[in-house]
Amino acid sequence: MNTLFTTENKRTLVYILIAYTFSVALRMVWVYQFADAQSMKFAGEFMINTNDGYFWAEGARDIINGISQPNDLSPVTQAASQLTAFFSRILPFTFESIIFYMSALLSSLVVVPIILIAKRVHNLEMGLIAALLGSIAWSYYNRTMVGYFDTDMLNIVLPLFLLWSVIWAVDTKEDIYLLITAFDILLYRWWYPQSYALESSFWLLLLLWTLLFERKSIYNYKLLSIMLVAMLNIDGSWRFGAIFALFYIFSQKKSEKYIYHILLLSIGAYFITGGFDPIWDKLKAYVFTTTVAKDEGGLGLHYFTVMQTVREAGHISFETFANRISGHIVTFMLSLAGYLWLLYRYKIMLFTLPMLALGFLALTGGLRFTIYAVPVLAFGMAFLISEISHRLTNSKALRYLFMSLATLAVLYPNYKHIEAYSVPTVFNAAEVEVLNKLKDIAQREDYVVAWWDYGYPIRYYSDVKTLTDGGKHSGAVNYPVSYILTRPQLQAARMARLDVEFTEKSFQPLQKGKKRFSNIEEMVKAYGLKDPQQFLKALGQNIEMPKKSRDVYIYLPLRMMDIFPTVAIFSHIDLKTGKRLQQPFFYKSTNFRQKGKDILLGDGVRLDKEKGVVHIGKQELPVKRFVKTMYDEKMQLHTEISNIHKNGLSVIFLSSYRIFLVVDESAYNSLYVQLFVLQNFDKKLFTPVILTPYAKVYRLNI
């Protein structure tokens, strides 16, 4: 009992409380800034600010309600949803408050393993400084702020606890850390199934450490074995039992004779149950990316890969990389120097290398990985500060003064980032009002067609099915949805019905020996064709449609105007060859001004009203039509169309939005422009259900 309440342990607890409070408090800056922003609230509660959060919220909601329709993709078996549902049942707060604040409260736990790791190298001051910096550095803050309801809230906390247990296990050789390390792996895998790669990296480093420094350590071989058992790619309940069984075996002295046999069996089981396959799959997805992917077998159709359009998977500059990890490029370089010094002084800290390496993968794999390097280089900065302070003076007061001032200096750019990082909620209140209203109109088995960015929020607020979402958005899945949104109404309507019916058909069991291909390929084959171009051409002609099994709704938000060109990319590709097809021309301007007879739209684009031409760079193109739209006091849309030339581009002025669009004929005739911008719908194909300036919903009639 006396050892539990030592001065060092008390200081550890105090430092953890200080750092945790600091981390949570800084995340409340966003709440303070937007306290009066009613557009970011629904039913009086703040909404979340990440699309993926609605996926986990949907699962938690369905767990609480005890209902989830077949094939709705609701994550009722996923850890984030289960933990959220648990908190919702035991805490006296609304569900909306829980999903909004949960990230800030759980992610701030990162300070605990940081300080505990520092305690192992007997430098608690380093731990406190690292915890303060690591908990609010750009990348970590961005992905764990209030409202960022995603698995990132524990994706760094849990591997840091694993790192802590491995370091303490290797350093103390206490049996309890065999169990703790194994259970850390179990918990990490339960929360984040993709943890397999990082777990394997820790194991490989431990193996290398053992071979280089502690080849005769029986304890290390026990640790290697039990880690492998915990890492097996099998059901968690089986691994849980196997861990206890192995721990019992290790408690028997005679087991040490067979430690190498046990390790070899563990290695064999690791490879039999998956080995490096899951790791290789992730590397292919984020590192060895391609623009176009080809379906193997069947017709061999080509699709545009989604990774090319996901910002967090894109290449980033070194400055962005450094800022996201340490807050400033100078801080980053100093942190790196301090980290190298730390490794030289305490070789046990070499176990941080897997997380640092994963963080540096951001240079090629995208900014999402920078979060892993944040706590590691925070150790480097903290060690540098603490070491310099001890070398500057023998005065404890002056040392603490220097450490305080230096810590404030490295925290300052991160605080300024937090102050300026005013990210909005995923949807505004008006958009959510539309989806909430749709919930009372549509049935749970009905589909809403929308771009994948909006899939999760639609499912959460409207309780319907979607064709694509943040987790289901491969090129093959996106192709038909892109086609629906960017093609003329007849072809779009038919594709919408076909994609919904073939999606439902894909849930049916396959006959033995048969392979399921993409919906587009299945459609082509269903009509007795081999050429996808013949099928696409037939959509605009006489073609027999499948029997309607449910209602289909088209969701068209104003915000899609910003990504229309990106949406169009996915269906403007030759399915047989993978070659890009001519993109619809779609230019949006909100920063325009009048200059004489011209309207300057920006980016070298100007409209000459007198001649009726548009200048794009050095090109002069005729304007076929000028369209002006406006909403009256009753929010009814009115449209004025002036035909100017026989051919050319169309200029659309959305006066109520203060937006200019310059589009070619392909974009002008697209479903999105016709139904959202102009509300010019074919009554045989569509029925308007909800029409607002922010979002419009139509029911498919065929």
Image (cartoon, rainbow, N blue to C red):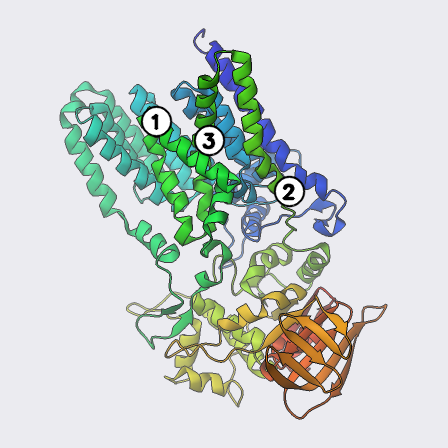
- The residue carrying pointer 1 sits among few (fewer than 14), some (14 to 19) or many (20 or more) residues within 10 Å by Cα, namely many
Residue occupying the point 40% across, 33% down: 337
**Residue nearer the viewer, 263 or 522:** 263
Residue occupying the point 49% across, 18% down: 12
* N-terminal-most mark, 2 or 1: 2
Q: CA distance from mark 2 to mark 1?
A: 38 Å
**Label disc, if present, on residue 167 of the rendered structure:** 1
Q: What residue does disc 2 label?
A: 95
Q: What residue does disc 3 label?
A: 381
Amino acid marked by disc 3:
Met
* N-terminal-most mark, 3 or 2: 2
Q: Is residue 304 visible?
A: yes
Residue 478 point in image, percent of width and height: 49, 68
- The residue carrying pointer 2 sits among few (fewer than 14), some (14 to 19) or many (20 or more) residues within 10 Å by Cα, namely some
Q: Secondary structure at mark 3?
A: helix
Q: Are marks 3 and 1 in contact (CB under 8 Å)?
A: no
